[in-house]
Amino acid sequence: MINIKLELKNVVEQTMIPESKAFLEELNELISSNNACNDDIEAKKDMESFLQELNTILNAIEKDEITDEQAADIYEKIINMLQEHEDEE
């Protein structure tokens, strides 16, 4: 049987955090080069909050403060988000 918490942890650590940090880096470069618009600045704030949420998820998994059902729900949302992003490309 699949351990959903482990799967969630893996997708957060191996995919979501690295991709989010890469996007945040791009936003920071735009901002530092004065090529950013207000949407970019807002996106940076959103991405920083999203990274905090991802870290909160990891901490909850580590401390066993999340049920399998909650982990499965979050995992499904993340997979759907990744698929939507992939479809846009």
Image (spheres, rainbow, N blue to C red):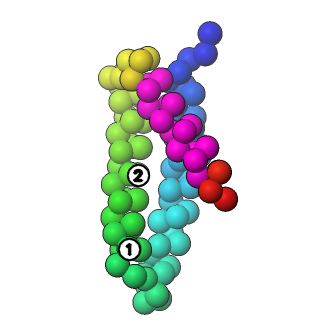
Q: CA distance from mark 1 to mark 2?
A: 18 Å
Regarding mark 1 in the picture, which secondary structure is present there?
helix
Above/below status of 62 relative to 19:
above
The kind of residue on which mark 2 rests is Leu
Residue 32 lies, in percent from the top left, at 43, 84
- Residue 80, compared with residue 23, is above or below; it is above
Classify residue 6 by image quadrant. Answer: top right
Q: Position of residue 18 (x, y in %)?
A: 56, 53
Q: Categorize mark 2 by other alpha carbons within 10 Å: few (<14), some (14-19), many (20+).
A: some
Label ID, residue 39: 1
Residue drawn at 39 percent across, 43 percent down: 55
| Contact? badges 1 and 2 (CB < 8 Å) | no
Q: Magenta segment range?
A: 71-86
Q: Is residue 78 magenta?
A: yes
Evaluate whether residue 13 shows in this view.
Answer: no
Q: Nearer the viewer, residue 14 or 70?
A: 70
Labels 1 and 2: the sequence-earlier one: 1
Q: Check residue 51 in the rendering and tell me which mark sits there, or answer none.
A: 2
Which one is in front in this view, the residue at disc 1 or the one at disc 2? 1
Q: Residue at x 50, y 56 (%)?
A: 20
> Amino acid under label 1?
Asp
Q: Quadrant of the N terminus?
A: top right
Q: Is residue 85 visible?
A: yes
- Magenta stretch mostly in which secondary structure? helix
